[in-house]
Amino acid sequence: MNMERKNWIRALTAHPATVLNALADQLTADCDVKLKSLPQAGLGLLTLTDGAFHEPYYLGEFPLSSCSIELALSDGRRAAGGAQVMADDAELARSLAILDAVLAARFPGWERVSAHIESGALSRTGEDRRRRAMLAATRVDFAMLNNAGDDDDEG
Amino acid sequence: MSYVAIKGGGRAIAGAAAVTEFLRTEEGLGNTCTEPPEPLKIDAILHQLRHLVDRVISEGGVYHPKFAALAVKQSLGDTLEAAFALRAWRSTRPRLSATPPLDTSRMRLIRRISSAFKEIPGGQMLGPTPDYALRLLRLDLMDESPEAFRAIAREWLETCPDAQLPDSFPKVLDALRAEDLLPPVSATRQQAAFDITREPLVFPVPRSAALATMARAETGSLLGIAYSNMRGYGDVHPTVAELRVGYLPVTLPHPVTGEFTEAGEVLITECEVVAMYEAEGGGKPVFTVGYGACFGHNEVKAISMAILDRALQKGMKDGPANPSEDPEFVLLHVDGVDSMGFASHYKMPHYVTFQSDLDRLRTTQQKSGEPA
């Protein structure tokens, strides 16, 4: 698995929150979890650049949860992790922050996080493929009336 | 106008809620159907009534599809009430963060068309649309079997092409701008955007306030005022340079590395129109442009917003020549929750004000010699 850290959240959130919470609980059974910022659920404000004049404006809000943690192993090793995720679920943000730290620092169990990222990425790839298929199946090339042939002609 | 507090009616109000709940669940008595009745599942609303959900997300101003579907369910499909419930929920949540200005050219598209050009870079793709369908009732859906329902999606997936397409597509407006056919990008594009959820609209307002207000406006209100412009009370005459629907990655800084990380994605509709050209300050003439976007898949809303953006630009520059060019008229009358609230408040007891109206009418009639 050589996916960049910035893409881990998208891959992991292809799994249900219950799966990620359970994994985070299992991986932290033997280490201390110190909260650097409390798990919070609230809203994020979505800023867009308008296409006409490239001015920023606010399109609206979205549910956002965030958390930062530090893991400490009994041998003294420490690892920082964090997550901001589009969800109204502070516990999920905490779990994602833990998984982020475990994988970034190659803490015990990182292979399981990596496997979840790989399977999640596969699921996201399937989603992207379905969306591309919607485009491909409806590609259109309207012909002018005075031109012979159009994209519905066979051969 | 004066108001007076009333009391009483508690039992009737509770009874009204119970009656409404009875109507929602009346199907459960089994008198009207042959199948065992089931409550509407949130997932069913999310998928099978997706345009309804999208409308509530957009007018509620919060991208929360599940809660929008729940709001649709509890309001029995009333979009104004559903948007109100979603706004009420958002008012209880703390604001944690704001994204940097996101670039919609990164959208993962499911639809992309242009009425300006037959051929656009990357091509046109109709995606999911009823645009070219006959508006006839599909009677086969009256009694759709679960087996047939499940088979449709499965068969489409089995036969759909494995497409070699890019993840994102260039914008038509960028091509026009590169040919010097559009006005330059804004000199104020580095300024902070106006937050309509924290600041009141005190006119004149910046364009970012107008865009944000219209983005969460009620679809019918926007359409009505935009339509007045199209039909003759205005002069926009737009051409849709590009209309796109797709999923925009929402990026925020990673709490540890600071690198921009995808936190999720939102489905949005975006429309860019070009309209009658003009020469600014005696310079070279260029097309004027308008922009519209909203949460969810709602093309009529995005097109209406783009037309009104262009109309409001003209009104702000030259003074309004018709209602759709007047920022105060447009922006103060398109919010669904505001306008529905005002209309609905007339149902509340106005006994004192009406008594006063009666008294004045009787007095006026007596003074004018009419029989009381």
Image: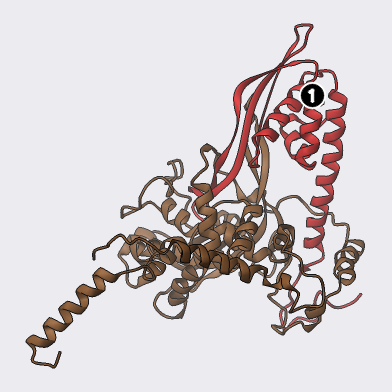
Chain colours: A red, B brown
Residue B345 on image: x %, y %: 38, 66
Q: Is residue B149 left or right of residue B129?
A: right
Q: Quadrant of residue B156?
A: bottom right
Residue B287 on image: x %, y %: 48, 64
The amino acid pointed to by label 1 is Leu
Residue B188 visible in the snapshot: yes
Q: Is residue A100 left or right of residue B322?
A: right
User: Crowding at label 1, few (<14), some or many (≥20) Cα neighbours within 10 Å?
Assistant: many
Above or below residue B128? Residue B162 is above
Which residue is nearer to you in this view: B114 or B25? B25
Residue plotted at (58% across, 64% down): B75
Q: What is the total number of numbered labels drawn onto the structure image? A: 1
Q: Is residue B267 left or right of residue B11?
A: right
Residue B274 visible in the snapshot: no
Residue plotted at (64% across, 68% down): B24
Q: Which residue is mark 1?
A: A103
